[in-house]
Amino acid sequence: MDSDQRESAFTWQGRRELVGRIHEQVDELVAARDQMEQLVGAIVAIGSDLDLDVTLHRIVNAAMELCDARYGALAVRGSDGALVSFIPAGINEDTAQRLSDLPVGEGLRVDDLHAHTPNGLSAQDPPMRALLGLPITVRGANFGNLYLVDDRPGRVFSASHEAAVRALATAAAAAIDNARLFERERESAKWTKASREITTALLSGDPQTGPLQLIVNRALELADAEQAILLVPQEPDLPTNDVNTLVVAATAGRYASEVIGRQVPMDGSTTGGVARRGLPLITDSFQYPIEGFTNVGERSAIVMPLIADDTVLGVIAVARRPLQPPFGDDYLELVSDFAAHAAIALALAAGREHALNQELAEADTLGDALNAAAEELRRLWRARRVLAVTFPSHGSSAGAVPEVVSVGEAGQWADLPPSTRQMLTALRDGDLLSPNTTLAGTAGIALQHPEGVLVVWIDLAEQRPFTLEDQTLLTVLAGRLGQGLQRVHQVDQQRETALALQHAILGPAQLPQGFAVRYQAASRPLQVGGDWYDVVELEDGRIALIVGDCVGHGLIAATVMGQVRSACRALLFGNPSPGAALAGMDRFAARLPGAQCTTVVCAVLNPDTGELVYSSAGHPPPILVHADGTTQLLDEGHTIALGIRADWPRPEAHVTIPVGATLLLYSDGLVERRRVALEDGISRAAALVKDLRVSELDESADQIMAGLAPSYGYQDDVVLLLYRHPGPLELVFPAHVSQLAPTRTALRRWLTRARMSPSQAMDVLVSAGEAVANAIEHGHRDNPEGTISLSATALDDKVQLTITDTGSWKPQQPIPDAHRGRGITLMRGLMQEVAINPETTGTTVRISARIS
């Protein structure tokens, strides 16, 4: 072949090769165009749905189509890098698990897995040969790894395949982010809706939609979980750090009836730790076993504290099924609003128990406590009737009839149907604190009573089931009721002892004439305190008046008060001087723990003359109201409280109490009020004494206590001591003429105290003598064993005498005796007023004369 022929042949060969290469490039361009179109279509497809699960499946299928791969999988990983879930396509779970074990890094492309890895992928059926693995990064964090595999001989993934899948992975990241945001918003909307439902249930107060059960039901549903439990403190009145035990109060889902009522210690448990710290937690294991919950298997759970007013009221735990995806950290934010509403629900439930505790705290007797508790239980369940039946203990008298407290409908034991009595008796003989709900619309429970067994029976207003939450609440409240009744019983016994002690050391029960006293302790429940009064009849005929106030309340203050009071009495008997008595008490109080800063006013009264000597150690001043309404504060002789400074001078002051005047000694609890000046309280007391200066002394004491009492009751111990000068004369003597002389002597002495002139006093003595003589002679002519009483009082500007006998006077003679029968006429001539009232039980004569 010549040179021209060779050149021509070469040219044609070159042309063929060139055309072939051009065709190859065209095919590659067409394939690239098709792949690009396919990639664009895949990107559009995976971004067209906002459902995350649908989006993930579309990503795997689109990647397989781009590379013509037979198999694929997406391994989703959590924030900690742990495997969360698989999205397989064409392969089984075991193969997908083996794929996820391969490290992908920035990308992994393997032509022959048999030579690359010993993990057994090439030995699968069918055997895996080619592999392409690429990461998917969403917002800078690894979301998961996309795997493409093929089992065909000679099949490999090219660089263009890898580039296309990388582009798809970038688009997939945006689609996944959008789907996750949408899913988050959708989940948040569901939790928000559930929160509103709980709020609605709380506001409606419908007992059929109990808040605790609603909480766990919604949590179970929204979290797509297997179980949900709600735990509350067994000791709800204690601070969180002092609570020892949590109890499962509501459940939903699997094993609900087995988990209810389970107890979990605060220390050493996962739920207790969440309650202590007040922070939510995602976990797959629990430290303390809860039968029926933590022993189901290892699964993801979220544990949330329920906080209201900075107080942890409970804990809710929600657990998914073992093969479900675990909770992510972002889930904690989703449930925060729901947990806040759940805490409100728990606060409401706690309020129910608090209301019962408050009713029990205010009860003074077991009967009061039972009535209050029955009323509260009826209100809580909107019941038609609540029975509280006390069965006496076996040591009580045989055949004792049970005591019934019935609210809603009246009824006693004999009024109850035999079937009801039989049911109540059966409850008494059963287990304590175990609810019985066998009859629809009813519930019963037995608990310990200080005097036997108490059975509580609730008849609902409608025939609805008594739910698990109802039963839990009833059990808790019954336990609190039993404790409360025991406390009321103990306090009642202590109160009797304390009051007996208080009355023994407080002051004399029998007061001299002319005195009235009132005492009220503010300290519940024992009702004893540190205020005291004393009225001491001294050997020389004078009378000591003391009102004091030891610091504090209750038994401790009462004990100190008793010692200080006794010291004051002893000092006055040794030296009837108020100043000397306070000086001695000063030294005593300085050495007696709890007696420092005691305030006291001490006065010594001469009842014949009205002279009053007084001294005050830091105590509010006595009030003296004259018969004409003039008011005087006895604020002289006033120094510091006892036990503060040694050898402090205790000066005395003197005043003469005029006839008809009223003296008020008191403790600061009578007049002291929050945000009100003490002087204003004293002025109010003085005004009341002034208004009541002509009333009977006991009536005045009652009116002053009532008139000065605040609307919320006295918040401090109160002592009120009244004296009106002169004190009334009260005489009771046999109906015999021998009593005329001593009666006349006693009356003369009293008239002297009343500052009546000698001539006026003589008129009164004559008139009274005639009345007494008539009572002896006429009223008791047939009954010489009878008695006569004579009383004399000084009111304002006059004296009044009342003479009463127990017989009947002789009828007036139609023809008067010239030497007899002039007594009544004489009385009417001497006295301003004379009234004679004959009755079947005796005759009363009232005479009065003005003091000039």
Image (cartoon, grey):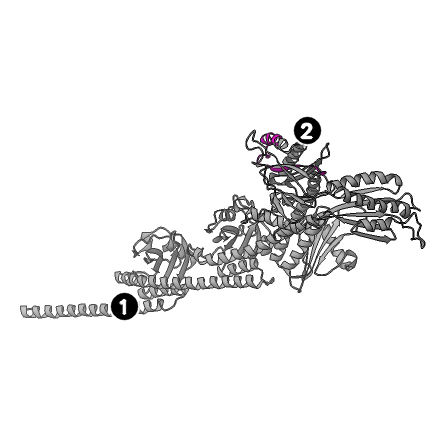
Q: Can you say whether 389 is above or below 667 in the image?
A: below
Q: Can residue 513 be seen in this view?
A: yes
For the residue pair 443 and 60, the one nearer the viewer reads as 443
Q: What residue type is labelled 1?
A: Met
Rendered image: mark on residue 134:
none
Q: Position of residue 694 (x, y in %)?
A: 70, 50
Q: In this view, does 753 lie to the left or right of 339?
A: right
Residue under the point 62% across and 33% down: 579
The reply to whether the magenta stretch includes residue 590 is yes
Q: Which residue lies furthest to the left in this view?
A: 3
Q: Position of residue 658 (x, y in %)?
A: 68, 43
For the residue pair 636 and 19, the one nearer the viewer reads as 636
Residue under the point 33% across and 69% down: 44
Q: Where is residue 833 in the image (x, y as percent from the top left)?
A: 79, 52
Q: Where is residue 142 in the image (x, y as percent from the top left)?
A: 34, 55
Pointer 1 local density, CA inside 10 Å: few below 14, some 14–19, many at least 20 = some
Decide which of tag 1 and tag 2 comes sooner along the chain.
1
For the residue pair 584 and 821, the one nearer the viewer reads as 821
Q: Nearer the viewer, mark 1 or mark 2?
A: 2
Residue under label 2? 574
Q: Is residue 409 left or right of residue 307?
A: right
The reply to whether the magenta stretch includes residue 243 is no
For the residue pair 392 and 605, the one nearer the viewer reads as 605
Q: Is mark 1 on a helix, strand or loop?
A: helix
Q: What stretch is highlighted in magenta?
A: 583-608
Label tally: 2
Q: What residue type is labelled 2?
A: Gly
Q: Is residue 325 left or right of residue 561?
A: left
Rendered image: mark on residue 36:
1
The quadrant holding residue 49 is: bottom left
